[in-house]
Amino acid sequence: MSSMRILIIEDDRDAAAYLVKAFREVGHVADHAADGVTGYDLAREGGYDVAIVDRMLPKMDGLSLIGALRAQNVDTPTLILSALGQVDDRVKGLRAGGDDYLAKPYAFSELLARVDALARRRPKGASEETVYRLADLELDRLSHKVTRSGVEIALQPREFRLLEYLLQHAGKVVTRTMLLESVWDYHFDPQTNVIDVHVSRLRAKIDKDFDPPLLHTVRGAGYMIRDSAR
Amino acid sequence: MIALGKLFRTTAFKLSLAFLALSAVAAGLVLSIVAFEVTALVDDENRQTIAAEADGLSEQYEQGGIRRLGHVIEQRTREPGSSLYLLTNFAGETLAGNIERLPAGVLDKPGFIETPYETADDSTADRRALARIFVLPGGFRLLVGHDLRDRARIGAVMVRALAISLICLAALGALGGLFVARRVLRRIDGMSNASRAIMAGDMSERLPVSGSGDELDRLAENLNDMLTRIGALMVSLREVSDNIAHDLRTPLTRLRNHAEAALRQEGDSKAYRAALERTIEESDGLIRIFNALLMIARAEAGADRSALIDFDVGEAARGVVELYEPAADDVGATLKADIESGVIVRGNRELLGQSIANLLDNALKYGAPEPVLALAPPTAPGEEARPAAPLRDVEIVVRRAGEMVEIVVADHGPGIDAADRSRVFDRFVRLEGARSRPGSGLGLSLAAAVAHLHGGAVRLEDNVPGLRVVISLPAARPASLREPARKAQAASATALS
């Protein structure tokens, strides 16, 4: 995993210190700004890969900060962290120019996975690939065909979307909530392990009769598709 | 004792003062009219008397000339209580009569006149008379008049009557006002004392009702009803918060216990790890409960109406069914969907999706048919008995029912007793048999709150056997939908031609 430069704009010192330490431990560079104005200045000069913005900040609130950055054509991907976690808060955050929204309290693994996913999104202009390849697995986005070792695998439409999303983030952890949000477009808590069942079905189709296994469960975090041979 | 100043400030007292002033004016007006009428009557009588006297005198004059006239006047003035007479010659000298002095010029004009005069025996008294002046041939003038003392006396009587009645009125009015004010004040004081006690926290206190059924009683009764309602709401609120406290305390205690146990035991890092992981799991569960509570609170508060959009419930339901299908399969259940297309509702897709998910989740968790133990042969354990059991079907139906849209989730489990059906919508209520399984007891509460937010309701029915949950919501007005549909049709029509 390549190192990223992450800007954390958060007024709670403990929370910020925890995040800086946690990101450094996994090999990223993390800077901290304690208020909206400092955060805005840093983000503008910055060259950061991702900015993590708290919604309620002294001097300038998170949403205004993101709005100001976007007005200055600073397109650093931003993730909004907020204690306001309802659907309409989320919609407000994304409408203000945020790229992702995570409600407090959160799991660090969830935040890390989302930051990874955001950083990967850049550059924006790059054309999307039409065929994803991982080891001997191939997914053709145009013909909706999936093959492994040349053998065609029949997938349900949702399974196809699931695999597509996993492959988009190949080598990175993808959490259950990320899957629920991106593949099903739901932001609620499905209570039971519905996502796990879907993933295990997909795994049965793409991994069962083949070697090596590609779709891995990351304990306490989510899933990752990767070529373990390499 | 009620302070006098407080009494004077009461609305009742001020009102009675105002009425007092009004009735004083009215009494004055009535007495003035009476006085005016009475004087007019007296005047009229005087005129008639004068006219009669004049007639008599003119007869005497015609018969015996001026000399006879003078003689008759002399005679008449001698009678007690006589009228007033004066006869003068052309030079203004008195020939006969009982008037000593008159203001100058009174005798110049013939006709009626009101004038002061003096008599021979009493020149001091301020006397007035109504008189008629006649001019006789040869410069003689005759005055026939009547003293106005009676009229003045009547006027004085009237003024005195007015004064006395005003004084009586004032005294009675003030006393009455004070009495009414005191009565009202005492009752209002009773009410404000009671409300102060209520404010101080005694919710069982009620405003006093006198039983007379007057407007104050009606006010007190309405306020008392309001207090009863508030009391009921407070009780239910307290129940909810007690429940919340209790249901959060349980997982919090568990969380703390795990952490404590981990600290106490001398373990390797692996054991600590496991303990920490459990702690995180527990706190995730807590967060989940918090989120659900917040969501319910938001839905109950009515949320942002502008956030509501028209969407196809059928599609949303299909999405949830598809999400749950593998999970259902895993527990050996089949989701049977009978979902109409194009069933549009104005609302919050996310919240409704979560509601449907909750119902499906419940149906999968608790909707397992009761084991048919009696039918299962005891010889074959487990495996053999299974096919005999009824299928674990969960039906989900979305259909239009008149003006409403119904979302039905039905299972074939043990169902819910009719007695428990209204209770299960309360937060954290978990029926016997469900407590041993994971869950928060918030699923149906959310479904009910969300249905309510959409102007609909949730009802529970017997699926004989099993539970059938019906969410009914008002369908969106189709006008906004037909529009694009018609446009699309038109577009395809033009494309074809």
Image: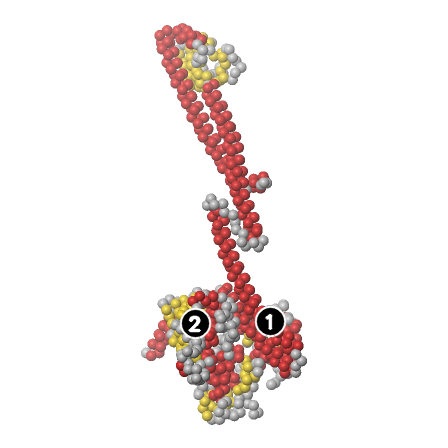
Tag count in the figure? 2
Q: Nearer the viewer, residue A182 or B231?
A: B231
User: How far across and down, in percent of the image, does residue B490 sit?
Assistant: 35, 74
- Figure quadrant of the N terminus of chain A: bottom right
- The chain containing the residue under callout 2 comes to B
Amino acid type of disc 1? Answer: Thr
Q: Is residue B68 left or right of residue A183?
A: left
> Looking at the image, which residue is at 50% across and 51% down?
B223
CA distance for labels 1 and 2: 32 Å
> Looking at the image, which residue is at 53% across and 44% down?
B187
Looking at the rendered structure, which numbered label has been put on residue B253?
1
Assess whether mark 2 and mark 1 are in contact (beta carbons under 8 angstroms): no
Q: Is residue B440 above or below residue B162?
A: below
Q: Specify which label sits upstream in the sequence, 1 or 2.
A: 1
Residue A203 appears in the rendering = yes
Secondary structure of residue under mark 1:
helix
Label 2 belongs to which residue? B415
- Figure quadrant of the C terminus of chain A: bottom right
Quadrant housing residue B256: bottom right
> Looking at the image, which residue is at 50% across and 32% down?
B169
User: How far across and down, in percent of the image, does residue B335 sit?
Assistant: 42, 78
Looking at the rendered structure, which numbered label has been put on residue B47?
none
**From this viewpoint, which residue is outermost toward the front?**
B379
Q: Is residue B105 above or below residue A35?
A: above
**From this viewpoint, which residue is outermost toward the left?**
B497
Amino acid type of disc 2? Answer: Gly
Q: Dot 1 surroundings within 10 Å: few (below 14), some, or many (20 or more)?
A: few
User: How far across and down, in percent of the image, does residue A223 sit?
Assistant: 54, 83
Q: Dot 2 surroundings within 10 Å: few (below 14), some, or many (20 or more)?
A: many
